[in-house]
Amino acid sequence: MIAVSVGGPHGHPLYDPVSHRVYATSAADVDLVLVAGRILVRDGRLRIGRPATALAQARAMAEGIRSGGEGDVAP
């Protein structure tokens, strides 16, 4: 589950919440992320692991996908 802020300037006017999420929301607007009952992001900040490690794993996964692999990265 995610909670997204609409308090910033680009959050207004909010006519259609679903359309707004698709066209106006960015990653910077994510306030909270819950996965399997665990809070992964709170107040827009990663709460588990190290951001540099997560970024390195995401880059490795992306490279694996681009090269035709599955993008799996060992934890």
Image (cartoon, helix red, strand yellow):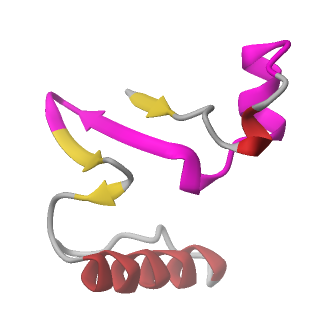
Q: Quadrant of the C terminus?
A: bottom left
Which residue: 78% across, 43% down?
Answer: 10
Which residue: 66% across, 51% down?
Answer: 26
Residue 35 position, x and y percent, is 25, 35
User: Residue 42 vs residue 48: left or right?
Assistant: right
Please name whichever residue, 9 or 17, is drawn nearer the observer in this view of the structure. 9
User: Residue 75 vs residue 52: left or right?
Assistant: left
How many circles with numbers are drawn on the protein?
A: 0
User: Residue 24 vs residue 2: left or right?
Assistant: right
Q: Quadrant of residue 22?
A: top right
Residue 52 position, x and y percent, is 30, 85
Instruction: Provide the residue span drawn in magenta.
Output: 14-38
Q: Image height check: is 75 above or below 17? A: below
Which residue: 15% across, 69% down?
Answer: 49
Q: Quadrant of the N terminus?
A: top left
Please name whichever residue, 42 or 2, is drawn nearer the observer in this view of the structure. 42
Which residue: 49% across, 44% down?
Answer: 30
Residue 11 position, x and y percent, is 73, 34
Please name whichever residue, 45 or 49, is drawn nearer the observer in this view of the structure. 45
Residue 7 position, x and y percent, is 60, 34
In the picture as drawn, the residue positioned furthest to the top comes out as: 16
Q: Quadrant of residue 6?
A: top right
Residue 72 in magenta? no
Residue 16 in magenta? yes
